[in-house]
C-alpha cells in the first residue's frame, strides 16, 4: 500500500496496557470491580480467622500488632466465588492458608473423597481442587526445616490450595508439591518468600498475562510478577508494608514505604523511654528531634502515643512510622540508619 493510501486517524494510538497497578481497597470490593473473565491468575494470602486460635493459645504474636483485620470463615465461599468469576477459562488460583483454614474451605466447598477421573475434586464455587502444595519453611541457609507455631510438632509449613478453572497445563511438570524456602527477611505481617510466589506465577502464566492479589500485603506478588514480565494488580486496605520498589505505583495519598530512597547501614532505635527522659545519646536525641518525636519541651504527642503501646505493638508502629514518612532533606545520619532498620527484616534484640 502506498503512503498516499494510508488513513490519517484523528486520534492518537491507544496507550500500552499498564504493567502494574497498586490500589487501596477492600479485597472483596476490588474483586467485584473487575470484569468477568478478565484475570489470568490469582495468588493471595487472606488474613484467615484461625490466627485467632493461635492468639488465644499464645502460640503466635502476629495478631497482637493490629496489622490487619481477619476475614471471617463465613466469607471464604464469597472469596472463591468472586475469584472464579473474574478468572478467564483455563486458569489457576492459589490460596495460602494454614491447616485449619484448609479444612474449613474443603468442608465449605464440599470437597470430599470422591474424585474425578483425572484425580481432581469438584468445588461448590465451580473450581476443581487439585491438591495442597506445601511451603516448607527453612532456615535462611536452606539447610533444615524451621519450626513455627503450635505445641505438638510445631508447624513448619503452610498450605497453598491449588484450584483450577477449566484446564491448563503447568509450565513445568517436574516441580514437586513441596516448595522449600526461608521466611521472607522483610518486615510486615505474613510476608511470603519471593521464591515460592515466583514458582507459582511461572507455573501458571505466560508473559504479559495479568496476575491479581487482592490481599497484597508487602506486594511480593507484584514484585515477582514484574520480574517475570507479567502484568499485575495489587490491592490492600493498608499499604504501609508495601515493598518500596512498588511505592511509585500506589495512589499519591496512600501511606506507603516512602523511605525507599534511604541508603544506610541499619541501626536499631534505642528504647523510647531513653528518648523521652533524655538519657539516649546525643546522636539519638538529634534524630528523634528531626523526626518529630522530641521538641524543646521534651516528648511530643507522637512519642507519647508510641510509649503507651505494648512492646510488640510498639515495634510494628515504630517501623511503620519510619517507613512511611518521606525522608527530609539533610536528615541526621542516625535517623537515616533507623529508616534503614525499619525497611530491613532485622528484629530488635
Image (tube, rainbow, N blue to C red):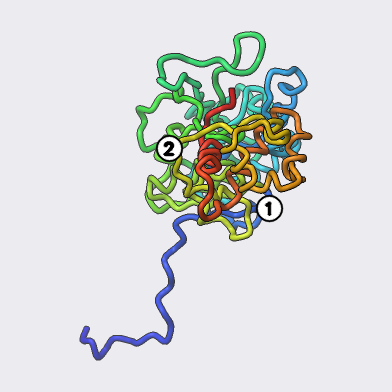
Q: Residues within 10 Å of mark 1 (few under 14, many from 20)?
A: few
Q: Nearer the viewer, residue 305 or 122?
A: 305
Q: Looking at the image, which residue is at 59% across and 22% down?
A: 349
Q: Position of residue 254 (x, y in %)?
A: 63, 55
Q: Residues within 10 Å of mark 2 (few under 14, many from 20)?
A: some
Q: Is residue 97 above or below residue 302?
A: above
Earlier in the chain: of badge 1 and badge 2, it is 1
Measure the alpha-carbon separation of dots 1 and 2. Answer: 26 Å
Q: Nearer the viewer, residue 301 or 315?
A: 301
Inspect this view and state whether residue 108 appears.
no
In the picture provided, is 346 more to the left or to the right than 28? Answer: left
Q: Residue furthest left?
A: 2
The quarter of the rendered structure image containing the N terminus is bottom left
In the picture provided, is 252 more to the left or to the right than 183? Answer: right
Quadrant position of residue 49: top right
Inspect this view and state whether residue 317 appears.
yes
Number of numbered discs: 2
In the picture provided, is 74 more to the left or to the right than 195? Answer: right
Q: Residue furthest bottom?
A: 4
Q: Which mark is residue 198?
A: 2
Q: Position of residue 116 (x, y in %)?
A: 53, 29
Q: Nearer the viewer, residue 16 or 266?
A: 266
Q: Position of residue 267 (x, y in %)?
A: 52, 33
Q: Nearer the viewer, residue 111 or 1?
A: 1
Q: Secondary structure at mark 1?
A: helix
Q: Which mark is residue 337?
A: none
Q: Looking at the image, which residue is at 69% across and 28% down?
A: 312
Residue at label 1?
29
Quadrant position of residue 287: top right
Q: Secondary structure at mark 2?
A: helix
Q: Looking at the image, which residue is at 38% across and 45% down?
A: 228
Amino acid at each position: 500500500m502506498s503512503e498516499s493510501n494510508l488513513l490519517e486517524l484523528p486520534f492518537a494510538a491507544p496507550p500500552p496496557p499498564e504493567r502494574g497497578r497498586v490500589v487501596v481497597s477492600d479485597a472483596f470490593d476490588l474483586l467485584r470491580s473487575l470484569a468477568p473473565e478478565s484475570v489470568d491468575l490469582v495468588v493471595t494470602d487472606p488474613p484467615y480467622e484461625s490466627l485467632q486460635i493461635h492468639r488465644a493459645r499464645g502460640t503466635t504474636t502476629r495478631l497482637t500488632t493490629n496489622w490487619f483485620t481477619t476475614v471471617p470463615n463465613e466469607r471464604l465461599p464469597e472469596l472463591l466465588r468472586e475469584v472464579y468469576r473474574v478468572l478467564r477459562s483455563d486458569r489457576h488460583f492459589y490460596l495460602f492458608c494454614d491447616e485449619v483454614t484448609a479444612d474449613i474451605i474443603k468442608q465449605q466447598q464440599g470437597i470430599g473423597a470422591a474424585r474425578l477421573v483425572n484425580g481432581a475434586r469438584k468445588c461448590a464455587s465451580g473450581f476443581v481442587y487439585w491438591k495442597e502444595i506445601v511451603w516448607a519453611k527453612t532456615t535462611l541457609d536452606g539447610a533444615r526445616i524451621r519450626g513455627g507455631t503450635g505445641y505438638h510438632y510445631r508447624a513448619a509449613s503452610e498450605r497453598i490450595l491449588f484450584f483450577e478453572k477449566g484446564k491448563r497445563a503447568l509450565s513445568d511438570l517436574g516441580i514437586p508439591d513441596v516448595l522449600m524456602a526461608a521466611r521472607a527477611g522483610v518486615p510486615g505481617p505474613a510476608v511470603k518468600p519471593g521464591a515460592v510466589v515466583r514458582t507459582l506465577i511461572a507455573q501458571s502464566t505466560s508473559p504479559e498475562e495479568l496476575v491479581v492479589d487482592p490481599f497484597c500485603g508487602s506486594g511480593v506478588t507484584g514484585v515477582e510478577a514484574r520480574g517475570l514480565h507479567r502484568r499485575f494488580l495489587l490491592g490492600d486496605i493498608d499499604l504501609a508494608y508495601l515493598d518500596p520498589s512498588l511505592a511509585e505505583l500506589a495512589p499519591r495519598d496512600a501511606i506507603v514505604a516512602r523511605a525507599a530512597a534511604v541508603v544506610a547501614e541499619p541501626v536499631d532505635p534505642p528504647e523510647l523511654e531513653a528518648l523521652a527522659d533524655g538519657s539516649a545519646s546525643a546522636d539519638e536525641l538529634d534524630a528523634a528531634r528531626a523526626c518529630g518525636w522530641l521538641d524543646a519541651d521534651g516528648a511530643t504527642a507522637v512519642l507519647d502515643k508510641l510509649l503507651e503501646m505494648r512492646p510488640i505493638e510498639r515495634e510494628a508502629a515504630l517501623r511503620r512510622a519510619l517507613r512511611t514518612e518521606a525522608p527530609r532533606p539533610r536528615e541526621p545520619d542516625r535517623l537515616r540508619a533507623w529508616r534503614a532498620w525499619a525497611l530491613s527484616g532485622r528484629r530488635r534484640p
